[in-house]
Image (cartoon, grey):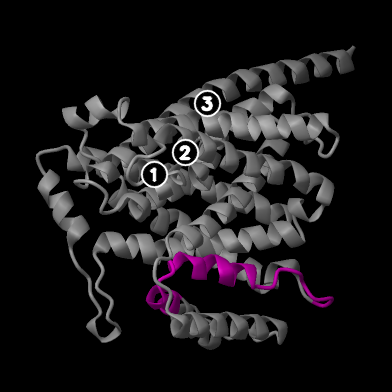
Amino acid sequence: MRSELARYLRTETFGGALLLIAAAAAVLWVNSAWGASYTTMVDTHLDIPALHLNLTLADWTKDGLLAIFFFVAGLELKRELVVGELADPKRATLPILAAIGGVVVPALLAIGIGWGVEGMDRGWAVPVATDIAFALAVLALTGSRIPAGARVFLLSLAVVDDLIAIILIAVLFTTTLKMLWLTIAIVCCAVWALGQWKRIGTPFLYVPLALLAWYSLHEAGIHPTLAGVTLGLLTRVRPDADEDEHCVPAAKLEHFFQPISAALCVPLFALFASGVKLDGDVFSKLFTDRISLAIIVGLLVGKTVGIFGFSWLAVRLGIARRPDDLGYRDMFALSVLGAIGFTVSLLVAELALDGVGDGSEVELAKAAVLLTSLTASLAGSALLLRRGRAHQARRDERALQGQE
């Protein structure tokens, strides 16, 4: 499974670079002379009348393409829980507690700053998620000289972090629940699990089940991306006695869908979600509006303090241990990277603030997410480069002593 993890990290790094390009393209496009064409594209409807699906292209990226992203996240989480780093309770404790701290502290800060403001009854969830692709891309570019345990720690906490965010999406943004459609979705998931148990491998069973589960959750009033992570968690990851580890369903599905998610789904979502018009009104409100301040402080301060604080406390209390050769300064740098809250934060901003006020709150929240993610990536990169030099100097010193 180690080679599978390495492949995952390489793909996510590439996907993170594409994500940055797509986000930058969206911001430049909407603020250019051709900005009206961007708005037209985002608001263009692609409807399926027979299924009563009336969605814009932006909605399709948010509800449809991100379901694939969450499916891959579910597969990765299942693999980590069963045969990966999170399968060992001692190793799993640290990233799990770090992820919890990275959710609780930002949420509390956001609630405290935005208390009583319209939209913050659900908007406090915007700064709770770390973007896997973005954070891993920054780590790969600037943290190549720090110990390999840093990548596993960041990946593990980001996966658990995303699971918590997915649960929050399901709880906070389910307003009307249609039990018949929910029952159909549950049956689809049960049949999927049964097929895995019976070792059925044909896509003619699983593709219709996945599509029906997605559609049923959409019609039930639950955000359909939940179908992705649920089916991912129900997929078999442990090989049979006579089976190669690369031939288990989870490995094959992840190998197929992860490049699609990293190279297509997430960048397209970034392209459609990052088009924030950066006019004087946005800049004037960015550091005075309580919603944007709640997001900025929640992400930049809350994530860093929550991840590092819970990690430090867990190690000091003896209930967890640090990865080999990873010091507290390294973990602080990784905690700063945890403040990169791009994909899921943008999704939650759209869900939580849609229809609030005159509509500018969504754009302001997105601008806050973009600004904070950029700040966290630059600060984290600087810290990682510094830590990388320290680790390299230590390795050079050991090599010199060995020659003597």
Look at the image and say whether residue 221 sits in the magenta stretch. yes
For image coordinates 25% across by 63% down, the residue present is: 57
Residue 130 x, y percent position in the rendering: 52, 43
Name the mark nearer the viewer: 3 or 2.
2
Q: Amino acid at mark 2?
A: Ile
Whole-Å distance between the Cαs marked 1 and 3? 31 Å
For image coordinates 52% across by 84% down, the residue present is: 183
Mark 2, secondary structure of its residue: helix
Q: Which of the numbered marks, if any, corresponds to residue 112?
A: none
Residue 298 x, y percent position in the rendering: 48, 34
Q: Mark 2: few, some, or many residues within 10 Å (few <14, many ≥20)? A: many
Mark 1, secondary structure of its residue: helix
Q: Amino acid at mark 1?
A: Met
Residue 157 x, y percent position in the rendering: 64, 45
The magenta segment is 214-242
Residue 225 x, y percent position in the rendering: 46, 65
Determine the image quadrant of residue 175. bottom left
Q: Mark 3: few, some, or many residues within 10 Å (few <14, many ≥20)? A: many
Please give the residue where the numbered disc 3 appears in the rendered image.
Answer: 381
Which residue is at the front of the view, 83 or 285? 285
Query: Which quarter of the rendered picture does the C terminus lie within?
Result: top right
For image coordinates 76% across by 20% down, the residue present is: 395
In this view, the residue farthest toward the front is: 116
Check if mark 3's residue and mark 2's residue have beta carbons within 8 Å: no
Check if mark 2's residue and mark 1's residue have beta carbons within 8 Å: yes
Mark 3, secondary structure of its residue: helix
Please give the residue where the numbered disc 1 appears in the rendered image.
Answer: 120
